[in-house]
Amino acid sequence: MDRSTQFRSTATSNPSQASHGGLNTAHRTWRGQTQPQMHIGTMPFLPDPDFIERPDILTLIRDGCARAPHRIAIVGMGGIGKSHLAIHNAYRIREQHPDTWVFWVDGSTRERFRSSYRTIAERLDLPRRDDPKVDVLQLVSEWLQVEENGPWHMILDGADQVDVFFSTQNPLSSFLPPSRNGTIVITSRSIDVTQRLVGSERDILPVPPMTTDEAHSLLRAKLGNNIDDGETAKLVAALSYTPLAVTQAAALIDNGRVPIRQYLNEVQVRSQKKVSIPNKDASH
């Protein structure tokens, strides 16, 4: 599923043009220039109103950002809720520290990474950003290293591919500078990539499936409380307590297209078919 369909998007697909609740788009510019009271940043997603708190994980994310090198990786399979956790944490930072710039960077490809940095350069109104002789990656990287520019927080989302960040020429990892006034949260499905990006295993946070109570709460948030607890318990268990799977199920059930019991039966049938597929290597 395309990542943009998993979150409530802002009013425009271009985060550099979003109104973000009607706030004036005043920006901190280059060194020594005036600073606004609140920074808009480049978050392309609004907070999820149905977000279910996972306090233990969120506490570990905050603790990881607080200690040097001020970056932490959230690692897990697709659909486990990594990006939701990072986005929720980022909005909490913006609420508690409105003078902090919050940036979102798409780490899935080199092209999308560069596009995200260009959006940051535009949001910051950086001089020479439109100069074809200027590397926008280097321009933003230099801004991030200047302490006078104030605190910033970055989500590097979908950093799954080693060759995206560690190519032989101009590796993108070099444009994620260490900074005493900046923090980075990386979401990834790859332990290899995150180990190389954060440099320490203690700064890699595996994200497990939701607990039973968390998965129940998510389904209730989507469908309301007038649902059968017994069927709900069976359904979230059949979906392996995976947030994306629960959300997708709720969307079909809420639209009246599929009753809970029917959806549960379909999931169970699919699971049985997977189990019944013979293992070709078992006889060797």
Image (cartoon, rainbow, N blue to C red):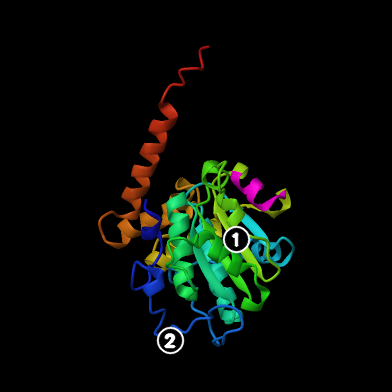
Q: Residue furthest left?
A: 257
- Determine whether 60 is above or below 174 in the image: below
Q: Is residue 195 magenta?
A: yes
The local crowd at label 1, few if under 14, some if 14 to 19, many if 20 or more residues have their Cα within 10 Å, is many
- Does residue 154 appear left or right of residue 72 in this picture? left
Counting from the top left corner in percent of width and height, residue 98 is at: 57, 82
Q: Which mark is residue 185?
A: 1
The residue depicted at 66 percent of the width and 46 percent of the height is 195
Judge depth for marks 2 and 1 and give the one in front: 2
Q: Residue furthest top?
A: 284
Q: Identify residue type, mark 1.
A: Val
Question: Image point 55% across, 60% down: which residue?
Answer: 138
Label 2, on which residue? 24
204 vs 54: above or below: above
SS for dot 2: loop
Q: Position of residue 181 (x, y in %)?
A: 67, 71
Vertical arrangement, residue 203 with respect to residue 65, above or below: above
Question: Which residues make up the magenta segment?
Answer: 193-200
Tell me the tag on residue 209: none
Packing grade of label 2 (10 A; few <14, some 14-19, many >=20) is few
**In the image, farthest residue toward the front:** 133
Of pointers 2 and 1, the one earlier in the residue sequence: 2
Magenta stretch: helix, strand or loop mostly = helix
Q: Is residue 137 left or right of residue 264?
A: right
Judge from the rendering whether residue 152 lies leftward or rightward of residue 233; answer left or right: right
* Image spot of residue 240 (x, y percent): 49, 47
Residue 168: percent from left, percent from top: 57, 41
Residue at 47% of width from left, 50% of height from top?
110
Q: Is residue 167 visible?
A: yes
Q: CA distance from mark 2 to mark 1?
A: 27 Å
**As shown in the figure, which amino acid type bears the numbered disc 2?**
Asn
Label 1 element class: strand
